[in-house]
Amino acid sequence: MDPLETTPLNPTTPNLINSILPSHVLVRAALHVEEALKSTPSSPSTVRFFKHPKLSSSAQLMNHIRLVTYRFTSNYFSFLASASITVQLLLTFFQPPPWCGDDCHDLFDSKLYPSFPSWMLVPQGTSAFLEKLTLATILLELFLRTVYLTEPPRYFDCSSLFRSDPSSSSRLPVSVKNSIYIITTLSLSSFAFFPSATSSLPPVKPFLRLVLFVIASESTIRELSLIRSLLPEVMRILMLEFLLLTIYAWFGTVVFANGSEEGNASFSDFPNAMWNLWVLLTTANFPNVMMPAYSENRATFLYFSSFLLIAYYFMMNLLLAAIYSDYDKFMKAKRERVEQNQKANLEEAFALLDVNGEDEISKETVSSLFDFLNEHCPDVGYIDSVRAKLLFAILDSSGDNLVDIDEFLKFCQVLSLEFASADSYRGWFELSFPSPWERVNSIVEHRMFAVLVDWILVMNAVVIALQSQHELAGDKESGKETSAEIWGWECYETVFTCFYFVEMVLRVLSSGWKGYWEMNRNKFDFVVTMITVGVSVYVYYPNQENDHRWIRYVMMLRLLRLLRLVVALEQFQVIGATLTEVLPNASRMLLVLFCTFYLFSTIGVLFFGGLINTDPNSVYSGRLKGTEFDDSNFWANSFNDHCSAFVTLFELLVINNWTVTCDGFAAASNSKLARLFFVSFHLIGVVVINNLVISFVVEAFMTEYNAAGSRTGRKSNRTDRGVTVSSQQATFDATSITGTRSGVEGTYYAKVGRRGVGSRR
């Protein structure tokens, strides 16, 4: 029996009696709208539970239990399970690494094994408790999800475990993901609940935690799928690079094989030549690798320069261009897929609602659809009665109280709007004291008020610069201040603090707390001002702490507001708006980079843990004596714990001096095979992911730059329909929108927000 052909179970569904459409039609339409908001394919895949009039009471009760379980799990338990998976992953950083076991505290405290402080290691009992607690939470969610499914065997065929990402392009079947998820969870549970039985197994827990984290993150899978699609093109270019390396290494080994200093140092044999040319490709050893031969014969410059021109300047930029091209194609295909999925879902929903085939649906039908979205689609933002009226009025652009297919296809865009009544922004001061509020508001809104604040900020910067003149000049001995000087600086700091506090109070009184707190700039000013006032009170209040420099340090944060003088220029406004939009979206790239770091840090701790140490009795420390690693004092670069490993990998990502670290581990392990680890990280972390990040930044920057360029500098204008539009929001009279009587009175603000899927209140 197809559940979508039956009727909903919940007998309390709003408008069920008065609805002009059968409830099962409205449910199916609501599911299609939900899928349109998530931009997934047009057949709703989320599990829903319905009843059939001929079902027995026990079967209906079972379906009701499943429905209640589904809502409880979706609204509450999914977050706990996600948090538990994250805690599982982070536990790796606070547990003793496998190479030292129970001796880690003593070894780390001895300072002979460079690492982060031993107090960061969680006690074994606490660690075991957290492991069991988080895994029990994940297992309980798995159990609940099997309960609310119609049939447990269908678990491997549904997508209820994973929320579909709006731009998902993962080719990994849902059944495979769910299977991996379950197997990984059960494997980790066996390690946690049966430690004695699994103690002899290899230390694979960190790897299993990473698999669990990745498989439960749709955005990470999507980025990994993108990387996988880039690999063929990357491999082709890298093969050309390898061929070029082979030719130049062969040529260099032959040319410099006459016993010269260059030949002995860098081209003694073919593997050594390949290695030094690979390092040269990263520019980490240039011009050092060239200098012996160049000192003897200037013509050798042609050998090294031609290699760099072809392999570095041309081939590596060709690689970046190829990655950017593929990434651009991927993003365009994603946008097209999102639009197609949205259109297909909305067309399906409209066809279901238009039962009479009139190519239009009534206001009552749309209102019922809103009710069923609230009732059956917890992933859709809640639509209250006022918002429902405003949404319909905007949706009905023709003003005839009917919605045709063209208007309905804008459903997703309309549903992304956020509304706020103008009255909700009126603060208590405006409501209680209207006349004084008008005077305060006129002061704050006056152009000279902002100019005054800017000049005070400049004066504050000058005063702090004068206070710090000795430190800035490096003359710290003569920088000692007398009591009179300290008293004078304290007076200046107090005046500035009072001014900033008064400015903050005036802005709050003028805008109201809601309007004031909506601006990120005001949030920053409020936090810094309150910290400055608190520090001032603490320092000046009679106690042992009377160091006025604390006030100076806090007030220096406020000087960041001087950036407003820079962004006042239109060109900088565009850049600032672009960065504001791009940076939040970069989180998924950072997540992929974090997973890469985690993987390589786990491998590094497993194979190189304990190799870097200053223990005089250790054979590893003896091998490092006299090496460039030792001379450069790189002892802190180790894989003795996961935190140190992350720092070491970050240094490798920056590339500079990466060969010193690499050769140090090769010397400590007494094997040049250790270089494979560092070359692998360079290929994945630098060549692939770093170029992918550059491609993302370029693509996102160009998109937002063009959009921000059209927004920036746009002055408020009033449309022919009575809507005042600015770069931030639209102000309109809610009584009548696009000719449609909304039934809502008063002035409202509308702006595009991030509401919709996942924002239920």
Image (spheres, helix red, strand yellow):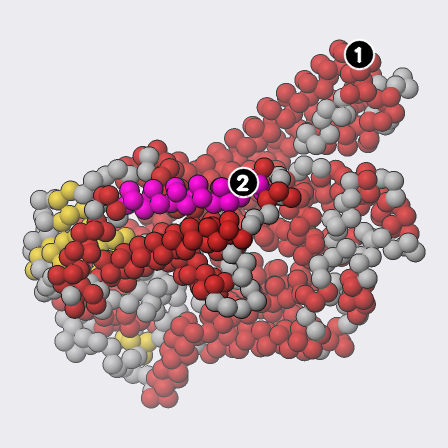
Above or below for 458 versus 341: above
Please state if 97 lies on the left or on the right of 686 as rendered.
Answer: right
Location of residue 569 in the rendering, given as x and y in whole percent from the top left corner: 33, 34
Mark 2, residues whose alpha carbon is within 10 Å: few (<14), some, or many (≥20)?
some
Image: magenta residue range: 450-472
- Nearer the observer, 112 or 100: 112
Q: Which residue is mark 1?
A: 297
Q: Are circles 2 and 1 on residues that touch, CB within 8 Å?
A: no
**In the image, residue 456 lies in the stretch drawn in magenta:** yes
Location of residue 438 in the rendering, given as x and y in whole percent from the top left corner: 15, 57
Residue located at (51% from left, 70% from top)? 81
Location of residue 645 in the rendering, given as x and y in whole percent from the top left corner: 70, 53
Above or below for 495 versus 58: above
Q: Which residue is mark 2?
A: 469
Above or below for 230 versus 615: above
Residue located at (82% from left, 27% from top)? 266
Q: Nearer the viewer, mark 2 or mark 1?
A: 2
Compare marks 2 and 1 and give the one earlier in the sequence. Answer: 1
